[in-house]
Amino acid sequence: MKSVVALCFLLAVDATLAPVSAAAFDSPANLLKDVDTADGVSEWEADAIAKAYFARHVGCGSYGGVSDSPEGWVVAGRFGYAGSEITGFLIDKADGRVHSTIGPSYATPREMLQPATDFPESQDGLPRAPETNGAAASSGGA
């Protein structure tokens, strides 16, 4: 009887797990490589832009897709530990401009491939925390 219950449990769990595509783990650069905003932004391109944004900026949350609206492509998803619904996140249909309510906005999708400017880089090229008292800067650090 225990083995029947265990088998039923495993089958139920397996049936609820959706397969994850390899694209879900792509880098922002790979996701944006075929996006051309010169002729406007298609739904496929908006989806790629949104996935690249989530890969770059959303460490805790989930991407839910894009939908058409008169204002632009509306990005759906959840953000943060509590999974708060994202509202007001748009991708412009004409030029791909990213209007984000959860992080930085971009004039073009390719701008998100640039290094972060909010943290200075150390000698090894990795971001470091901003200095709070200037002591590290005067001590001959990075």
Image (tube, grey):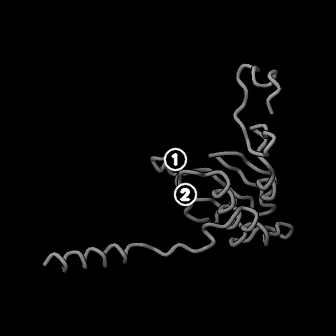
Which of 61 and 75 lies nearest the eye of the viewer? 61
In the displayed orientation, state which residue is furthest to the left: 1
Q: Amino acid at mark 2?
A: Gly
In the image, is 116 to the left or to the right of 100? right
Q: Is residue 19 left or right of residue 101?
A: left
Question: Dividing the picture into quarters, in which one does residue 63 lie?
Answer: bottom right
Q: Position of residue 7 (x, y in %)?
A: 25, 79
> Is 3 drawn above or below residue 113 in the view shown?
below
Mark 1 → mark 2, Cα distance in angstroms: 10 Å
- Tell me the residue at 80%/25% (across/down): 137
Label 1 crowding class (10 Å Cα cut-off): few <14, some 14-19, many 20+? some
Q: Nearer the viewer, mark 1 or mark 2?
A: 1
Q: Position of residue 120 (x, y in %)?
A: 78, 37
Q: Secondary structure at mark 1?
A: loop
Name the one closer to the observer, 125 or 97. Answer: 125
Tag of residue 77: 2
**What amino acid is found at the position of numbered circle 1 in the picture?**
Gly
Name which residue lies at 70% across and 63% down: 27
User: Which corner quadrant holds the C terminus?
Assistant: top right
Q: Answer with the quarter of the image where residue 5 lies.
A: bottom left
Q: Nearer the viewer, residue 104 or 9?
A: 9
Label 2 Cα neighbours within 10 Å, binned few <14 / some 14-19 / many ≥20? some
Residue at image position (57%, 74%) is 21
Task: In the rendered view, tell whether residue 10 sits above or below residue 122.
Answer: below
Residue extending farthest to the front is 140
Helix, strand or loop at mark 2: strand
Q: Residue at x 55, y 63 (%)?
A: 64
Left or right of 91 on screen, residue 38 = right
Mark identifier at residue 80: 1
Where does the N terminus fall, quadrant-wise? bottom left
